[in-house]
Amino acid sequence: MFRLLRKTPKAVLTNTSLYNEHSFYNAFVRDVKRAQSVVVIESPFLTEKRALYFAGLFNKLTRKGVKIRVNTRDPRHHDKLLEIQAWKSIRILRDNGVKVYFFNDMRHRKLAIIDGQILWEGSLNILSQVLSREIMRRTNSVELAHQMIQFTKINNRFW
């Protein structure tokens, strides 16, 4: 990883900003609203409240042709209460044009990539955060977004 950082131009590394659980959603929604082609979100947990929060925006974008994909844990890997929340959330997301993919690898990554250029990464579960203290980093860099796509293989499934 450090070898990659040494090869990365300084301008790419400095085009970042930090957000907490209070400042994240306004900035993230602003980025999502500007999406032109693809939004990919990895959130291991889903809640009905957060799905409803994004439903209208996701619906508007998918009708304009923006592809929205959510990678999440298989709901059957959660305890009963979280499983019920996940299934309700999945229904809401799918009803609004979002492709939702389940993974059995107990993933815990929290990230989003918008148009292969804006990378959000950190500790905040984008589609379920409620009360916890969190941090997210926003990076505007095609190079670093692509690096994350390659490293995580986030697009390994077909649309």
Image (cartoon, rainbow, N blue to C red):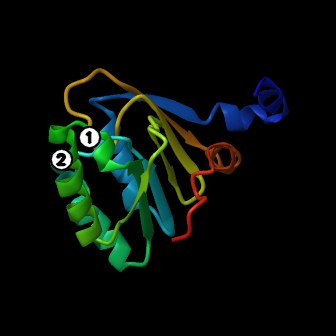
Reply above or below: 52 against 110: below
> Which numbered marker is on residue 16?
none
Who's the residue at 33% across and 51% down the image?
A: 29
> Which residue does the numbered mark 2 point to in the structure image?
85
Give the quarter of the image for residue 79: top left
* Quarter of the rendering occupied by the N terminus: top right
| Sequence-first disc among 2 and 1 | 2
Image position of 91 (left or right of 35): left
- Viewer-nearest residue: 96 or 30: 96
Q: Residue furthest top?
A: 133
Q: Secondary structure at mark 2?
A: helix
- Amino acid type, callout 2: Gln
Residue assigned mark 1: 128
Q: Tell me whether the residue at label 2 lies in contact with that at label 1, contact meaning CB atoms closer than 8 angstroms.
A: yes
Measured from the top left, where is residue 120 in percent x and y? Answer: 49, 41
What amino acid does circle 1 point to? Ser
Neighbour class for label 1 at 10 Å: few (<14), some, many (≥20)? some
Give the quadrant of residue 129: top left
Comparing marks 2 and 1, which lies closer to the viewer?
2
Taking 153 as reference, is 88 left or right?
left
The residue depicted at 43 percent of the width and 78 percent of the height is 65
| Res. 50 visible in picture | no
